[in-house]
Image (cartoon, rainbow, N blue to C red):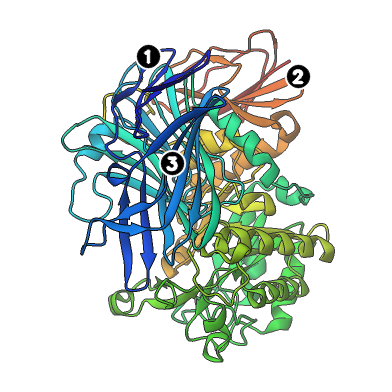
Amino acid sequence: MFILKNGSLRAEFDEGGRLLSLAGPSGNVIDSPCRDFFFANLACEGCLENHVWASRQTVEAREEGGALYFRIRELVADNGRSDDNRVPISIEFRAALEEDGLVFDARIDNRSAYTVLDFEYPRIGRVRDLGAGTPSLFWPQPFGMMFTNIGKRLASVTHRENGSNCLKITYPGYGIMGWCALMDRDNVLSLSLMDRRFYSCALRAKGYPDDQGAVTLSCDKFLCAGEGELQVPPVKIGLYKGTWHASVKAYARMMKESRPSHPVPKWARDMLGFFLVINKQQFGYEMWDYSTIPQLWELAKAHGCDVLALFGWYGTGHDNNYPDLGPGESLGGEAALREAIKQVQKDGGRVILYHQGHLIDRGSPFYRNGEGKRVACKTIWNDEYGEYYSKSHKSDALMMFSNKQFSVACPSAPEWQELMLAKVRELFDLGADGCLFDQVGGMPPYLCFDKTHSHPDGNPALALSGGQRRMLERMQQLSKELDPEFAFMSENITDLYSPYLDAVHGICYAPWPEGAEKPEPGSEETAVYLYPEVFRYAFPDTRITVRNNEPRVTRRLADFAFLYDAPLELEIRYAADKKDVLADAFPEDRKYAALVTGFRSKYRDMLSGAFADTEGIVCDSPGIYAKAYVCGSRVAVRLWNDSQEAVTPRISVPGKRLVMFASPKGEYSGPAEMGPQDIAFAVFE
């Protein structure tokens, strides 16, 4: 047995490389070790699945320089015909204590015709108890989730296919950050990726039907490692007493070098409301021609929005003909579009024009002339990845049998990057204040096996993360060369891509059901709660709208947006939406949304600051959510009474005095009563 220990942690390994125990302030958390401390899958011509299990390997162990090394000189693989297939690939695994964590990495020397496709390491064993209650899982699913009693939940998700009893999410994309954690009332076990190359991967939380309550965290890295040597990026396991904040703060520090900064137009940084309209739908149904754009701006203002976003403004309709988009004659023609945009701007409004940055319509001229097929991402079968979207609102026939087929563009392809730059110029030339290129903020990190694309290192696993960052960087730079006030946006949230954007059109970012107050970690109940605090705390500079696909902003959504400092959003997509918004079907919601954005605008300077969650504040009031925003020595605490009772909040910031308390009802010398679903803020200095 080998032991690593420092002032914070103690880890025991056997000679076969398995982690037997990991002890922190509250003792050991490994209930039982994994049989296999790693898993790999090898691909070769004729068989793409050759399974490599650690327990089938011959392992040489040694301790050197305070680290443990486990070497396998030759892999034994199972391809179904033989479970003793010898492959000339050697791997040296390493485990070492660094500060408050246990870091795992490896080096692969591939002397074969096989490709190391999957590489899951470390596999830390079954965790049932961190020391103070049933562990909850904090998961980077948009826009952050908390699963209480995760072990019990996963134990019941049993089937015979890949992923039984598992929760999996890809990163970068779909997964918003390379971090997840188990947490009870007092303790945290975190997993943080320390990959500065950003290989495509999947985070995994695995449960056990024969051991209800146990869970294992791991990461499957899709290395696509062919012949030669490869250093596998590290994974850090943290174990400590406290909250998730400490490990998230450390992860954010590591990510800082991969998050470049750029000047953001002030209007985009201060945006309060995003009024999203589809002018023409996918199957040709026309909602709003260009002459109605000034009317749409008036509706936007009435709902408290200061930005009008036009989707489907192009003649072929929304989710059609990508990337060949242009003004539609049936909608009024280019001159009418330009004039309508100018009218909105003369009244102080801002207009965003949509484009697609991820999908290629297989019916578009760009695809049919061969260019689209050339730049599309290719699977390991050398076929194109497909995504399918139907925007039919009333026709079941169209919805069920006419999903539009799209190929996925590879952002590493130079031709696609040049085309996207040209599209930025086109939208700017139409007179818009900004552009939104859909989906490039974080779709799944497809592996692209087309060798003619310029993938970093020629590696399929870096095609999306490497190519996307380069493409977004160039698009951001061009947008500011055209005009420093021209905004560049996208949809979807990730820590890797968001720093290239001036603002993000959010997704899956809305309040939990009324009455479902979020429990503290460690709860015995089996439930799922939105938990945006983690990403907001790690990357407070990212501006994200609340995603709302309804033609109204409910009171709770407006309050939620205030609490998390997110611009409001409402979407006018379909004929029924148009009917409702023109009929003012939800007048109280409309008035309240405008009231909240007016309140936020009035006190913009006082409310400013970096999101600090609940750090440094004390709020002892049931039903009140309180979030701190720190600006120098000033702390602004935003408050939301998400209860059915009137409450006078008991709020304080140790070491500071209350200098202001305000709500949409007025300013007060001290905390004032907040009715159900009321908002307020308190400023301390």
Which residue, given by chain and number where applicable, does mark 2 sit on?
633
Count of number-bearing discs:
3
Q: Is residue 51 above or below residue 533?
A: below
Q: Amino acid at mark 2?
A: Ser
Q: Position of residue 353 (x, y in %)?
A: 65, 67
CA gap, disc 2 to disc 3? 53 Å
Q: In screen coordinates, is 646 left or right of 497?
A: left
Circle 2: element type: loop
Res 184 seen here: yes
Q: Amino acid at mark 3?
A: Arg
Point out which mark residue 27 bears: 1
Residue nearest the viewer, comparing 490 with 547:
490
Q: Position of residue 509 (x, y in %)?
A: 48, 46
| Mark 1 or 3: the one toward you | 3
Circle 1: element type: strand
Q: In screen coordinates, is 498 left or right of 408?
A: right
| Mark 2 or 3: the one toward you | 3
In percent of the image, x 52 and y 75: which residue is there? 450
Which badge, 2 or 3, comes first in the chain's sequence? Answer: 3
In percent of the image, x 52 and y 83: which residue is there? 373
Quarter where residue 46 is shown? bottom left
From the image, which quarter does the N terminus lie in? top left
Which badge, 1 or 2, comes first in the chain's sequence? Answer: 1
Q: Is residue 312 above or below residue 180?
A: below
Which residue, given by chain and number where applicable, does mark 3 sit on?
71
Res 305 seen here: no
Q: Position of residue 635 (x, y in %)?
A: 68, 21
Q: Amino acid at mark 1?
A: Gly
Q: Position of residue 243 (x, y in %)?
A: 49, 22
From the image, which quarter does the C terminus lie in? top right
